Image: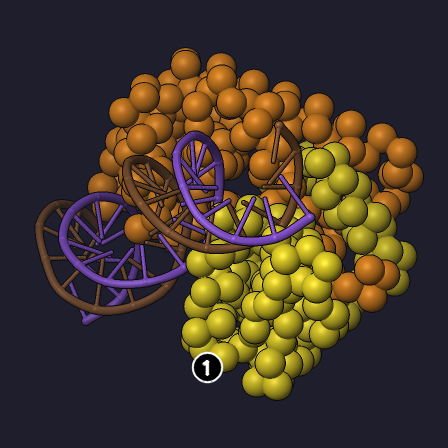
Chain colours: A yellow, B orange, C purple, D brown
Amino acid sequence: MKNDSVILELQRATHATLHLLTTELVDLDLTASEINALGNLADGTGRTVSELGAAIGTRPATLTGILDRLERRGLITRAPRPGDRRAVLIALTADGRRTATLIRRTLRDVEQRALAGLPADAVRGARAVLRALTEVGR
Amino acid sequence: MKNDSVILELQRATHATLHLLTTELVDLDLTASEINALGNLADGTGRTVSELGAAIGTRPATLTGILDRLERRGLITRAPRPGDRRAVLIALTADGRRTATLIRRTLRDVEQRALAGLPADAVRGARAVLRALTEVGR
DNA sequence: TATTGTTATACTCTATAACTATA
DNA sequence: TATAGTTATAGAGTATAACAATA
């Protein structure tokens, strides 16, 4: 597998971590996309639908359904952005903040467990590669 | 974003490259999963459904639908594996080989374009990290 | 009995295009 | 006219459980 495509390895790793993540967080009863959205909202900063969509690689039309469920469950709120009422600001509720914090903690735990044996510069290299692959797709 | 989760960056990069890939290969009229499956079959070695599923992180039940479409389009064949007729060997047809080769070439091109400016050890580090993240999810 | 793959079901994700409200 | 987001529609991915064929 040494000569395998980085992009194919990327998708392999994504599937594996996604599956592990939903398994570890099964009590939350959230889909992978919902976990992804909350994980990206975890820093607490308000974001518009477009901004969140860019962060997680999802189109606004897709995000609508995901946000509908998160809102119905009381994890986020949606409100028009002051100054431009076309845009919708997404914010975490207190409950959503707790859930997002748990998600971030689980992400950190899984990463620590997975990357424990690797040198720090491998992880730095990986971040650079991931960012480059994200950029080329814009 | 320096402190962002590697796993969240992973999913971001996956979405972006997947989107770019389906765009560059739009003439093939294949979904991301179909491209992924063919890309993994490109080396020509016969694989069972389970083996392919493990390689791309998809369950057999999901793979069935993907393989149905690829078979209907004449890109793969399915046949019982000699010696264990429960298992199904997937093989590329001549047409499938051509398509898979085109996919591999596109993968290589996109990777070269994305990673051109990065040092080789960053890419090596990324491969190690991706493999570690894949392993932790098993 | 266990394993491989398929089928059935229900839900989620996705792309696209049309639509509403606001700018 | 252009932009932000939602809605509508159709197709594809997903998990789970039940099933048939083979071991």
| Image label count | 1
Q: Is residue B51 above or below residue A121?
A: above
User: Residue A57, position in %: x, y?
Assistant: 62, 48
Depth order, front residue of A15/B135: A15
Which residue is at 58% across, 38% downward?
A: B18
Residue B33 horizontal/vertical position (percent) = 46, 39
Give x and y (percent) for residue B137: 56, 64
Residue B62 appearing in the image: yes
Which residue: 32% across, 19% down?
Answer: B74
Q: Which residue is at a point 71% across and 36% down the rendered structure image? A: A138
- Quadrant location of the N terminus of chain B? bottom right
The residue closer to the viewer here, B23 or A89, is A89
Q: Residues within 10 Å of mark 1 (few under 14, many from 20)?
A: few
Disc 1 on helix, strand or loop? helix
Q: How far from the left and from the top, in percent, is residue A106?
A: 64, 76
Q: Is residue B32 above or below residue B3?
A: above
| B41 sits left or right of B80 in the view | right
Front residue of B87 and A132? A132
Query: In this orientation, does residue A13 appear?
Result: no
Q: In this image, B43 relative to B63: left or right?
A: right
Q: In the rendered structure, which amino acid carries the disc numbered 1?
A: Asp
Residue B113 is left or right of residue C8, and the answer is: right
The quarter of the picture where residue B105 lies is: top right
Which residue is rendered at x = 57% and y = 85% of the image? A95
Asked if residue A41 is positioned above or below residue B42 in the image, the reply reads below
Label 1 is found on which chain of the structure? A
Q: Is residue A21 above or below residue B7?
A: below
- Quadrant for residue A121, please give it: bottom right
Task: Give the residue pinned by disc 1.
Answer: A27
